[in-house]
């Protein structure tokens, strides 16, 4: 009974978000008719796919009651190392570059994972520290230089600009990540256990679930996805800089929260995540189209996040009160 | 917990505890840092420069004290850097819009205090929300508002006397240093000699028990976060005075440095443990360390690496120390 009511509220929430997105899109379209054109939609989806990939990892971290503030830095670092490698060895196949970046990201994620899972360091503290260490290392390995477009091979840049089956590669990669994640979360034992750890860590541990190993796994996955996103980012913008993706973690967390992922753990669905990501993607894409200064973007995002978490709390209080009332009769 | 244990043990072990205090380690590290700095630059260990150097890094130290309270409550506030930026930007724009400077400074403190109070209010009103998400969203919002106000512009042109805050000296001692000492004394007394301070410690150990024993838990949380905001305003005043102008991206990463100083100072992130002396020493360790890295011509990004690692290592050492202590207690 209780379970059904939670699913019902989640569906209601997502329906509400979907309606909001539709209304918002129509309103923007009314202001500027360039918004709902096929080209703009394709560009918007391409830009949002990196955010969407990261959101999957962040959702898993949030589900275990953690948070990861270091992903922007991991993206910069892995992107920079990959770009330097590509610039140094021009003949390197793109798939190797992608693998290199992903593995490197996963290695950094594992370090965070050890800190959080083995030594019980608070996730905020551990990732705040890692965020700065890795950001600093990015500047150190690059010597403060940029890697620019002309230093990268055409094949490498084609990772982001090329098409597969008529759809941009970035979107295709995001789709693959979502399909794999959907299977992992819903149909494997490990995936279900991650949710168990998040919704009740003590009960999970008592029933023999290897809690620490799962938390370690979650941060490693997050790191790996951040590494993947790092190489995609560099290929997309054809430049690697020290300050790449600075503060991007905030957008990713915002997308998760908008998508209904609970910061108190155990709750989060891919369908909601997709809507949350789409919503942020629309905001980022549409603000310039309706003549709002880009400097407003951060403030608006912050307010949207705060409003979303507060609404979540109020809705949950309401459902709990109703459940209590039903039980009383 | 450790206080109560300490009461029961013999004098002999008390002596041992005295020498095995975290603060002695910090004193050692501080001396090491000073020695290395002296080795790098022969001009460093000259009383004149030595007393003036802290003026270069003390601006963020004002947030260290209230942040200590926040950590003792087993919470964290990552919005302080943004609060500094927002209050500094509002001060600069309101002054340039014609507000007299003293009033603009007052406005700066008010805005910062308000920013902290909003954090506190949200935490008290919506107890389901964790401190991470609340201060994370206000971190985005405050910085966002600063960008909305100033865009990518800088704002300055303050009256000459305003630079006294950051650059002035009284009897050869930097003004900012004197204010730092006074603040340290005030917060030390507040933490260790008042019921408020005891309540903060108590809540860090066991918030529920504190509540049942009559502590107004909500008011303590609200006050601590409001204080944190207010002191971010003080930092904004000194920082702006030293730089002469301000822009929306100032004080980025201050939250890391401040939290690193507090954690290095021996304040546990799991709450309830900490003494005022540790963070004060940590302020000088990290301050002299970054200053020394500047002397050695190391790149600024390396400072990031070092401070980030220091934060992680000090928390780690704490975890291990704490865990072994717990084990001993359970066997006894």
Image (cartoon, rainbow, N blue to C red):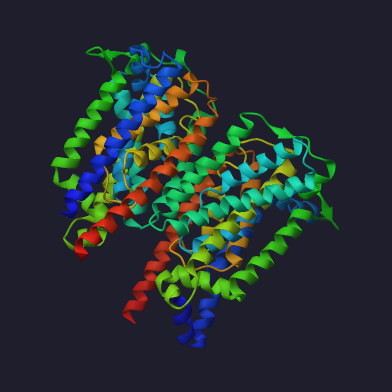
Q: Is residue B81 visible?
A: yes
The residue depicted at 48 percent of the width and 81 percent of the height is: B6
Question: Where does residue A264 sit, x and y in percent of width and height?
Answer: 33, 52
Instruction: From the viewer's perspective, tell me whether residue A184 is left or right of residue B253.
Output: left
Vertical placement of residue B166 versus A80, above or below: below
The residue lying toward the viewer, choosing from A164 and B222, is B222
Identify the residue at the far front of this view: A329
Quarter of the image where one finds residue A285: top left
Task: Count up the numbered dots.
Answer: 0
Looking at the rendered image, the quarter that the C terminus of chain A falls into is: bottom left
Report which quarter residue A144 is drawn in.
top right
> Residue B187 vs residue A313: left or right?
right
- Residue B22 against residue A276 in the figure, above or below: below
Residue for point 37% across, 67% down: B323
**Which residue is at a point 44% across and 71% down the rendered structure image?**
B205
Front-most of B155 and A303?
A: A303
B64 vs A55, nearest the viewer: A55
Q: Position of residue A15 (x, y in %)?
A: 27, 35
Q: Percent from the top left, x then y, of residue B244?
A: 75, 39
Residue B26, located in which quarter of the rendered image? bottom right
| Position of B131 relative to A255 (above/below) | below
């Amino acid at each position: 009974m209780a379970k059904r009511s939670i699913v019902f509220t989640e569906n209601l929430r997502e329906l509400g978000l979907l309606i909001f997105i539709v209304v918002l899109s129509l309103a923007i379209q009314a202001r500027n008719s360039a918004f709902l054109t096929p080209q703009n939609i394709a560009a918007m989806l391409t830009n949002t796919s990196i955010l969407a990939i990261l959101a999957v990892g962040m959702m898993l971290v949030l589900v275990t009651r953690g948070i990861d503030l270091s992903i922007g830095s991991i993206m910069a670092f892995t992107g920079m190392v990959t770009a330097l490698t590509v610039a140094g060895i021009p003949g390197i196949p793109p798939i190797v570059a992608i693998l290199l970046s992903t593995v490197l990201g996963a290695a950094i994620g594992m370090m965070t994972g050890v800190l959080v899972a083995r030594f019980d360091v608070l996730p905020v503290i551990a990732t705040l520290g890692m965020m700065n260490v890795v950001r600093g290392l990015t500047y150190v390995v690059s010597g403060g230089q940029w890697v620019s477009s002309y230093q990268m091979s055409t094949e490498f840049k084609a990772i982001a600009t090329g098409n597969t089956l008529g759809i941009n590669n970035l979107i295709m990669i995001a789709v693959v990540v979502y399909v794999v994640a959907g299977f992992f979360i819903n149909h494997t034992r490990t995936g279900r256990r991650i949710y168990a750890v998040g919704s009740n860590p003590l009960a999970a541990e008592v029933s023999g679930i290897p809690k620490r190993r799962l938390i370690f796994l979650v941060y490693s996955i997050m790191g790996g996805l951040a590494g993947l996103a790092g190489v995609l980012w560099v290929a997309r913008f054809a430049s690697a800089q020290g300050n790449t993706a600075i503060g991007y973690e905030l957008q990713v967390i915002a997308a998760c929260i908008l998508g209904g992922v609970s910061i108190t753990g155990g709750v989060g669905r891919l369908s909601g995540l997709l809507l949350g990501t789409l919503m942020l993607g629309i905001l980022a894409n549409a603000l310039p189209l309706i003549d709002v200064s880009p400097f407003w973007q951060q403030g608006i995002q912050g307010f949207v996040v705060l409003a979303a978490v507060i609404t979540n709390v109020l809705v949950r209080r309401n459902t709990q009160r109703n459940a209590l009332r039903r039980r009383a009769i | 917990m450790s206080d109560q244990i300490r009461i029961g043990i013999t004098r002999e072990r008390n002596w041992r505890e005295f020498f095995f205090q975290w603060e002695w380690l910090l004193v050692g590290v501080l001396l090491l840092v000073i020695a290395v700095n002296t080795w790098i630059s022969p001009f460093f260990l000259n009383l004149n420069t030595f007393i003036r150097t802290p003026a270069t890094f003390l601006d963020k130290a004002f947030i260290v004290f209230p942040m200590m309270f926040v950590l003792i409550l087993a919470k964290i506030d990552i919005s302080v850097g943004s609060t500094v930026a927002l209050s500094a930007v509002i001060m600069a724009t309101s002054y340039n819009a014609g507000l007299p400077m003293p009033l603009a400074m007052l406005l700066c403190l008010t805005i910062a205090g308000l920013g902290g109070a909003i954090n506190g209010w949200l935490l008290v009103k919506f107890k389901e929300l964790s401190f991470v998400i609340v201060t994370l969203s206000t971190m985005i919002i405050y910085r966002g508002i600063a960008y909305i106000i100033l865009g990518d512009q800088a704002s300055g042109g303050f009256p000459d006397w305003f630079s006294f805050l950051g650059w002035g000296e009284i009897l050869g001692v930097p003004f900012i240093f004197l204010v730092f000492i006074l603040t340290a004394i005030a917060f030390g007394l507040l933490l260790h000699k008042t019921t408020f301070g005891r309540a903060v410690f108590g809540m860090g150990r066991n918030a529920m028990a504190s509540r049942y024993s009559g502590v107004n838990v909500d008011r303590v949380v609200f006050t601590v976060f409001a204080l944190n905001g207010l002191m971010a305003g003080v930092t904004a005043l000194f920082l702006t005075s030293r730089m002469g102008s301000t822009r929306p991206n100032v004080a980025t990463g201050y939250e890391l440095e401040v939290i690193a100083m507090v954690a290095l100072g021996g304040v546990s992130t799991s709450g309830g443990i900490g003494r005022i002396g540790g963070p004060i020493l940590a302020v000088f360790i990290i301050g002299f360390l970054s200053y020394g890295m500047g002397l050695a011509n190391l790149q600024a990004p390396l400072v990031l690496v070092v401070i980030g690692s220091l934060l992680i290592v000090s928390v780690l050492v704490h975890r291990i120390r704490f865990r072994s202590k717990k084990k001993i207690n359970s066997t006894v």
